[in-house]
Image (tube, rainbow, N blue to C red):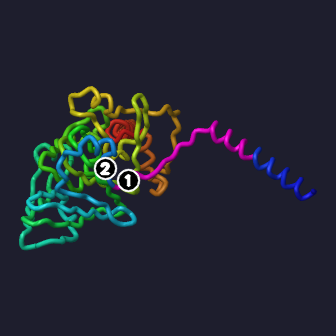
Amino acid sequence: MRHQALQHVCLTCRHQARAASTLSRASKRYVQISATPTSTEPTQRSIEASQTAAPPDARFEVLGTHSSLLSASLSASQNLYTRKGTLVGFNGSPENALSTLSLLEPFRRVPLAIPFLYQRLTSTTPYTALLAPKSPNTSLVVVHLDGRVDWILAQRNALQAWTGPSLSLRPQVNTALSPAHWGQTHTTGRGLLALSGRGLIHQISLKQGEEYIVHPSHVVAYTAGAGPSSSSSSSSSPRPYRFKATSFRLQIPGIANWVPDTRFFRVMRESAAWSLLSRVAFTLRTWSRRTIWGDR
């Protein structure tokens, strides 16, 4: 009897604990942050809507534990554009392959400091190319463009490889941000993009009316609606934002502490010309940090 009573009490306690856990779990809202998938493939709904479409002529796949290798499988006569010096392997018939240098609008990209020298690889037979970015600690992600949504490449060096006969890459200037982040690339059409970023790349999905604050140097790419002139494109474009901050100046040791305290330097520091040069240098440094690089 005592054993049965203890079992009944333990069973009652377990039911109460389970009910309390369910209530506390229902009253909380959990936010999960995960790494972006290595390939932004279409959802099941988009696959069902495009069942009559032809299969793709190219396939990008990210390899490696750190997502630092890209395997590009292409059909015959399909052009593959890659950054110069990123090709590390080739699987196919080398005698049927041809590699040439391609200039991508150099006169429009040079003023914006966007790379314009790429390597075009084509072959009369199907082949697979293995690519790797030259920068260390870099991860890759694949973006599928189906012609319905355009993408803006926010980083100048983010584009590593692409393919697609109808894919268009146009450099543009985003004057809403600081001059250090003006250079961007607007991508339209159908094709595949291989983008790179430092560290692990995460994906953030925002609903209509939601906002997210992030430093421009950490944004690799974002969607821009169906076209550059659409209302969704103008509403999704980033806008500069600055947090409220107080004036907190740090005292940095000057070079004068390491220089012998002679009469010449004492007289120079007390002169009006020295004070004017110090104020001008401080003003220029502060203005460049706020205006050019966008930092306080």
Residue 282 drawn in magenta: no
Q: Label 1 near label 2: C-beta < 8 Å?
A: yes
Q: Is residue 208 left or right of residue 107?
A: right
Kind of residue at badge 2: Glu
Label 1: which secondary element = loop
Q: Identify the residue position indicated by label 2 in the image.
A: 41
Could one spot residue 281 in this view of the protein? no
The x, y position of residue 126, in whole percent, is 13, 65
The x, y position of residue 134, in whole percent, is 27, 64
Q: Is residue 248 above or below residue 195?
A: above
The x, y position of residue 227, in whole percent, is 21, 33
Q: Is residue 13 above or below residue 176?
A: below
The x, y position of residue 197, in whole percent, is 34, 54
Which of the image's four quarters has the N terminus?
bottom right
Residue appearing at x 15%, y 44% in the figure: 168
Which of the image's four quarters has the C terminus?
top left
In the current view of this chain or complex, which residue is farthest to the right? Answer: 2
Label 2: which secondary element = loop
Query: Where are the magenta residues, as a range?
Result: 17-38
Q: Name the image quarter holding residue 72.
A: bottom left
Q: Nearer the viewer, residue 160 or 271?
A: 160
Q: Nearer the viewer, residue 205 or 124?
A: 124
Q: Name the image quarter holding residue 230.
A: top left
Residue appearing at x 40%, y 56% in the figure: 200
Q: Residues within 10 Å of mark 1 (few under 14, many from 20)?
A: some
Kind of residue at badge 1: Pro
Residue appearing at x 19%, y 41% in the figure: 188
Q: Identify the residue position indicated by label 1 in the image.
A: 37
Could one spot residue 104 in this view of the protein? yes
